[in-house]
């Protein structure tokens, strides 16, 4: 076997071992929490994720809106920088 193959196998074994340890550790930690706290944690994570994605979507949409002359604001900014 080549050196690269051996390194890939070692990396795969280490990755599986780390994931197994994380699985056991998280299982122990999460089983010790109250169900109401868990529901609040999951709800907060989902609401926070949705909020970030919504803000990202609207900001991206605002940046891609057309500037005068049919260029996007991003292209207009680059054009103004070049003109300087």
Image (cartoon, rainbow, N blue to C red):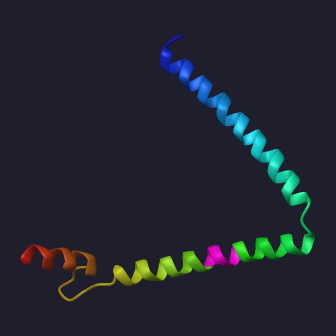
Residue placed farthest to the left in the image?
A: 83
Q: Say which quadrant the C terminus sits in.
A: bottom left
Residue shown at 73%/77% (left/top)? 44
Q: Give the range drawn in magenta.
A: 46-50
Q: Position of residue 5 (x, y in %)?
A: 53, 19
Question: Of residues 71 and 24, which is closer to you in this image?
Answer: 24
Residue shown at 91%/58% (left/top)? 31
Question: Of residues 49 and 11, which is closer to you in this image?
Answer: 11
Query: Image height check: is 30 above or below 82?
Result: above
Question: Of residues 15 and 80, which is closer to you in this image?
Answer: 15
Residue shown at 56%/77% (left/top)? 52
Q: Is residue 12 left or right of residue 73?
A: right
Q: Quadrant of residue 9?
A: top right
Question: Of residues 19 and 77, which is closer to you in this image?
Answer: 19
Query: Image height check: is 44 above or below 26?
Result: below
Q: Say which quadrant the N terminus sits in.
A: top right
Residue placed farthest to the bottom in the image?
A: 68
Q: Where is residue 67 in the image (x, y as percent from the top left)?
A: 24, 86
Residue shown at 85%/70% (left/top)? 38
* Residue 48 located within the stretch drawn in magenta: yes
């Amino acid at each position: 076997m080549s050196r690269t193959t051996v390194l890939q196998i070692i990396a795969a074994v280490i990755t599986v071992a780390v994931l197994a340890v994380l699985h056991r550790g998280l299982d122990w930690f999460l089983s010790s929490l109250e169900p109401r706290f868990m529901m609040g944690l999951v709800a907060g994570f989902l609401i926070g994720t949705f909020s970030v994605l919504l803000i990202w979507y609207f900001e991206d949409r605002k940046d891609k809106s057309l500037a005068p002359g049919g260029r996007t604001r991003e292209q207009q900014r680059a054009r103004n920088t070049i003109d300087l």
